[in-house]
Amino acid sequence: MARLPTPDRGQPIDVPYLYQMATAINDIADQVDESAEKYTTIYSREAQKQDIRTSDTKFFASFVDLPQQLQVSQGDTREFSFDISAANFKYPPIVTVTPVNTGTSNASNDVLAVLSSITTSRIDGFVRFNSSGQVDIAINVIAIGVPE
């Protein structure tokens, strides 16, 4: 969308300029109209179903690297956490974590990531290693929720 030029100080405001302003405002209104396709439904234990505008939905995405070249035995676990307090979620968000093999070890392919606690300010979980060996693992996280 074209930007509207700002008037110079003391410049008289005329009808063409007001027309350009009204057109620009209407273009913005058309882009953020109230259609059903522009809403996101978020279900949570605390608030049940929430339909909010997608533009108002809060997203948090990050990753954490576990210690690299970590030597593990089958059944070992390693904890991870994410501080999400800056995201300002109103309720604990819906969270997905994904383990990522950042190396070449087969043991890095045989892991399970589990979430143990989700609050409005923190995500905690652990990785369980199902094979022994040296591992190089990162954990990706995506949290989607209702903003404060």
Image (cartoon, grey):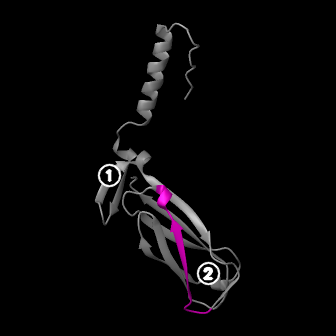
Magenta segment range? Answer: 73-87
Q: Earlier in the sequence, mark 1 or mark 2?
A: 1
Q: Is residue 77 magenta?
A: yes
Judge the density around disc 2: few (<14), some (14-19), many (≥20) Cα neighbours within 10 Å.
some
Q: Nearer the viewer, residue 82 or 74?
A: 82
Q: Is residue 94 magenta?
A: no
Q: For mark 1, what is the residue? A: 51
Q: Is residue 86 visible?
A: yes
The amino acid sitting under disc 1 is Asp
Q: Secondary structure at mark 2?
A: helix
Residue at horizontal 31 percent and vertical 66 percent from the top: 45
Q: Which mark is residue 30?
A: none
Residue at horizontal 35 percent and vertical 58 percent from the top: 42
Q: Nearer the viewer, residue 85 or 21?
A: 85
Identify the image quadrant of the N terminus.
top right
Residue 121 versus residue 5 in the image, above or below: below
Q: Nearer the viewer, residue 112 or 92?
A: 92
Residue at horizontal 47 percent and vertical 60 percent from the top: 85
Q: Is residue 82 left or right of residue 117?
A: right
The amino acid sitting under disc 2 is Asn
